Amino acid sequence: MLEVTGQHRECQEQLRKRARDLLASGEIAAFIGYGNGSLPWVPRPIVVRSPEEADRLVWNSFLTLNLANYLPGVLKELEPPRRRGEQVDPSTLPRVGIVATGCWSRNIVIQVQENQVDRSRVHIIGISSRGMISRHSFKQALGGKEALKIVENDHEIEVTLSHGETMVLSRWEYVRPNCKTCIHPGPVVSDETIGPPPGRRLVDERFREIEEVEAKDSQGRWEWFEEAFKDCIRCYACRNACPLCYCPTCFVDDSRPQWVGKSIETPDALTFHILRAYHCAGRCTDCGACESVCPVGIPMRLLTKKLIKEAQMLFDWEPGMSLEEAPLLGSFSPDDPDIAILKGGEKGT
Amino acid sequence: MRYSAYRIDRARLIEAINMLGPGFDVRVAPHLETGESGPGENMVKTFMFPQPEVLFTFKKAPPTADDVDLLREPSLPHTTTLLFGIRPCDARSIHLNGLAYEEDTYFWHRIEGAIIVGYLCKTVLSTCFCQRVGSGPDDTRYMDVVMMDVEGDHDALLLHGITEKGMIFLSQELGPLLIKCGGAKEEIEQSLGSRQYPKDTNTLDTLLSSDLMALYNAPFWDQLKDGCLNCGICTFRCPTCYCFDIQDETLGAKGRRIRYWDSCMFPLFTQHASGHNPRGGKIFRVRNRFMHKLKYFPDRFGAISCVGCGRCVRDCPVNIDIREVLDNLLEVARS
Amino acid sequence: MNWEPKIIAFLCNWCSYAGADLAGVSRLQYPPNIRIIKVPCSGRISPNIILDAFLKGADGVWVSGCHPGDCHYISGNLYARRRLVLFERLMEFVGLEPGRLEFSWISASEGEQFAAKAKEVTERIRVLGPNTRLRKVF
Ligand code: SF4
Ligand code: SF4
Ligand code: SF4
Ligand code: SF4
Ligand code: SF4
Ligand code: FES
């Protein structure tokens, strides 16, 4: 059980109302949001298909998956079957509603840029994120005990544990590092917004986690990499949770040539992570979904964040900020920094 | 006479385990020390199914080379693996996987060379549902030695040999390192007698007698699949998910054939070489995981392929809950 | 130990490969540690390929193409430049020693430059020693 009061409660009510209206008026055929699940700290992504169901929608601090991930699939599902090569006018196809925070909306922008999503078929209800709670640090805070019920208000999370014990956590302390340093908590594109405007974040500390690793020498960084990634079980949840990952055949599944060995031995697991991160270069919005879903707590988000830092420094680039932009690595400029002259240097800066 | 019952201090037991000879590959579950409830990390799965498992190695040899050298099976280890502190659910997973791996030499070599020291559960987590699938927190079947907490004394543990293998291990290897406690055997038998787990055979019977196609075509699958990411977390955390894939890896003139974990949640699992995929949509894959555990496997082997450990429930990032799926299936089966 | 660095050079067919050819025809000395793989354009190089070389035992990887502006396919190397600079930064971040990965632009007429670069790369990697960090062994 998860209950909300305060700002999130208001958002939740407005969200239900707007989703209900949109579904009832026929403007959209489905709405992508979150509902409650069987565990209080894991809300369940749901697709609402009728106005009556809209009351299942929830809004709280535990929404760590990026809903943009579901958008192309749901859009596709609603398309009537067609013959190969048959052209359809998108304006005749059913539309989909979705709720989006800053990073989710930026991922939708990227999906539009990359022709995965047709903007005209999507109705975006924007809500500025107040930062989502890290499942990993939340679990740690409970010290091995189980949360049976959660009640959250604007600044506190009250957890009921087994045997009736309770615990009160200060919300901001458990907010994920990517949310704490988010540069754009409010939606970048939307058809309407609900809830209060975004608050200020610690944007100055945006790359602190990265700088800590960069400060090590090459040997130290390698040791950090090996150690931090050694428990990966190759379940690919980080890949599948990411709205950027939509290739019909992922590089890990290629067998001729086989780019990545299939086991969990160090070189294989690390190669997987290097390439996964690299495929997100210039596209990753630091939404944190990958890190949140990992069952063993691998900090793979730091690799993509490093790429965000480099793309910003080298190309003055922030992913997913405008529908008109071309993808970073699908374009070039004659004035780009020249790799043959410009060297990374010992600290990778 | 063999002594096979001991009462021992937790810390001393861990000391004794560390003193065992080099013939043992000892793996101790962290909850033996912490006393934490629940199944804990999945030691049994990684033991049953190494990731990767080398089936054989091969090399390209000059024409004169001895044929024997071209292809070589790995020498199987002769150490005894001691799995210390395995919860009843996990111990039972070995038995269930054994049904499907009946003829697998590698699997059985490992299992036969292992001693399962089980650890009964004092408390159950909210996600534990071993009772519903035909077992329980006091289930001592599938263990060689059973270990349990002593009511009112956090530091004490009772140990009791169950199988021949377990009794020999206790009396000859671990026993001399422990202090025998005369009363323990009676104490254990008494407390086991009083803590009978309810065996739910009703669930299994209902699933067995239900119509497969009715379950397959049930409408709830369509909603269930919405949230699923088709990641492999549930299958990779699950002690009774045993699917694998095999690949040859080559490195210059040598190579190896490895077996590694696969998951029915991955599209590649059923992808044909032609490109056609009989389980092309998400719904097919989600449905397969649950139908396999709750219907196909029971139909074939007479048991549910789930031990109720709740790992998939806890670790699924989108909260797809097998208990709800089971409820839904039972509802369909009964209507 | 007689360890000799093994360096995989991915050379663009239209320029650097021809540059290597010219170096050979002109009988310029360059170290035999360079194993050349001809590619149609530096734009063909994906990080998968570079990592694959390291996994299979390369001690260094060197990618060379036409000078920016001179690409046979007009812009292949301009795309490559963006992609590879990010990749190099990522590799250094995870602890690949700086210098194991080399990039250059060498034209068909620059045989001397080719030989000089080959020497420079080989000597640098000799100092770094064998690659152990991303190499697959079994
Ligand atoms: S990093 Fe985590 S989520 Fe990604 S494959 Fe490894 S274990 Fe799975
Ligand atoms: S890589 Fe991770 S943080 Fe970046 S967009 Fe994908 S899921 Fe979000
Ligand atoms: S599922 Fe049952 S046996 Fe397993 S840990 Fe929970 S209570 Fe113990
Ligand atoms: S059920 Fe959950 S854990 Fe399993 S594949 Fe789907 S999302 Fe992943
Ligand atoms: S299906 Fe889930 S509860 Fe059942 S054995 Fe597997 S992980 Fe445990
Ligand atoms: S053809 Fe030489 S770099 Fe493109």
Image (cartoon, coloured by chain):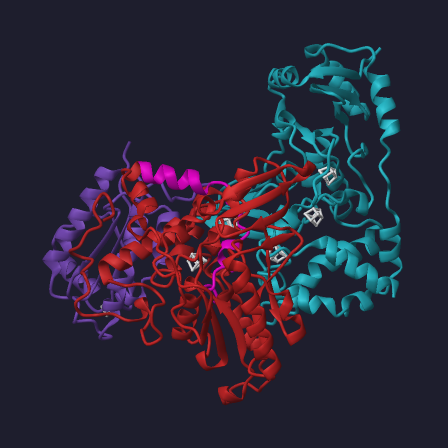
Q: Quadrant of the C terminus of chain B?
A: bottom right
Q: Residue at x 65, y 65 (%)?
A: B225
Q: In the rendering, at what x and y percent does residue A337 appear?
A: 18, 61
Magenta residues span A220-247
Question: Is A167 situated above or below B296?
Answer: above
Q: Say which chain is red.
A: A
Q: How many marks?
A: 0
Judged left or right of residue B202, residue A293 is left
Ligand 6's quadrant: bottom left
Q: Is residue C7 above or below residue A92?
A: above
Instruction: Tell me residue B190's x, y (percent).
Output: 87, 22
Picture colour for chain C: purple
Q: Indicate the quadrant where residue B3 lies.
A: top right
Image quadrant holding the N terminus of chain B, namely: top right
The residue most toward the front is: A6
The chain coloured cyan carries which letter?
A: B
The quadrant where residue A52 appears: bottom right
**A156 and A218: which one is in front?**
A156
Query: Is residue A312 in the magenta section?
Result: no
Which of A51 and B77 lies nearest the eye of the viewer?
A51
The percent coordinates of residue A266 (x first, y second) are 45, 42
The reply to whether residue C37 is in sight is no
Find out whether residue A241 is within the magenta segment: yes
Could you say which quadrant of the image residue A334 lies in? Answer: bottom left
Residue A225 visible: yes
Q: Is residue C75 left or right of residue B223?
A: left
